[in-house]
Image (cartoon, rainbow, N blue to C red):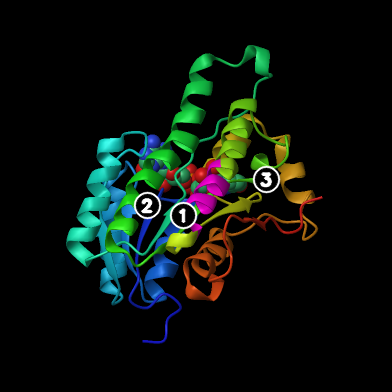
Amino acid sequence: GTGLLDGATIMVTGASSGIGAAAARLFAAEGAAVVLMARREDRLRELAEEITASGGKALASPGDVTDPDHVNRVVTETVRTYGALDGAFNNAGWATAGKPLHETDDSVFTQALDVNLRGVWNCLKAQISAMLESGTGGSIVNTASIAGVLATGATAPYIAAKHAVIGLTRAAAEEYGQRGIRVNALVVGSTRTELIEDVLKSAPHLEEAYTTRSVQRRMAEPVEVAQAAAWLCSSRASFVTGAAVPVDGGWT
Ligand code: NDP
């Protein structure tokens, strides 16, 4: 084939909707075998069937990223099915509409840190172990956010978690750079997905900022974020690591 990701096996978390689902479709179209992880099993199976029906390779492997046992199982299943893990898009995330910090329930802090940060942590440990074992290196992409570099348009716990995702990305890139493992983060701007629709339902005043702070005066479509992830997973990005790559339509 002539795809950007021919022959690669790539795990995608948060693959049941939004950016992750778009990435799964794109990676498969570019020749990768994709392993889909999220909690909603029906959606994962449907997507895996859709990809397989159009000639791609996909495996639905449901689970919760906050549970290291689930994550380890998905990585093990990946290696057993496709022989190795070459790439990962750690994209599962959770956000809720904002209240001021002092009124925010502690459960929001716990959930924001568990899904957005601990989820990436669990994935990195399992994926890096598998990549070191195969000895062929790999490329890992973590979904951060504008909220990972600026305090904007989100709750404080989400902002803290996404900042930490960028820190974890840099730490991992530094530790494994000499062993052929690249680790990057995507600094994603407002993107039309269920996550943002949910936030806007309870905070409609944010819609204007989410649109007008991009110099393109619009939100991204999920596939536009997926394209950057595909590039980072591919050998075209062979000298890119430890980077926080903006995909934000020019945020001002
Ligand atoms: P979606 O809500 O469409 O996707 C979120 C995905 O994460 C779903 O597939 C969901 O699947 C999965 N997920 C949530 N919790 C867990 C969990 N505990 N274990 C496994 N999977 C989980 O939103 P997006 O596509 O927008 O979000 C993708 C990423 O992009 C997130 O990290 C988000 O923070 C980030 N982002 C989004 C922006 C936007 O404007 N949309 C802006 C900046 C960053 P399921 O419920 O089936 O588990």
Q: Which mark is residue 128?
A: 2
Q: Which mark is residue 167?
A: none
Front: mark 3 or 1 = 1
| Left or right placement of residue 134 versus residue 116 in this view | left
Q: Residue farthest to the left? A: 80
Q: Is mark 3 within 8 Å of ligand 1?
A: yes
Which one is in front, 30 or 73?
Answer: 73
Residue 118 in percent (x, y) is at 44, 34
Q: Which mark is residue 146?
A: 3
The secondary structure making up most of the magenta span is helix
- Within 10 Å of disc 2 (Cα), the crowding (few <14, some 14-19, many 20+) is many
Q: What span is in magenta? A: 168-177
Q: Which residue is mark 1?
A: 176
- Within 10 Å of disc 3 (Cα), the crowding (few <14, some 14-19, many 20+) is many
What amino acid type is highlighted by mark number 2? Ile
What amino acid type is highlighted by mark number 3? Ile
The span from disc 3 to disc 1 (Cα, nearest Å) is 25 Å
Asked if residue 61 shows in the view, the reply is no
Which one is in front, 133 or 142?
Answer: 133
Front: mark 2 or 3 = 2
| Left or right placement of residue 199 versus residue 11 in this view | right
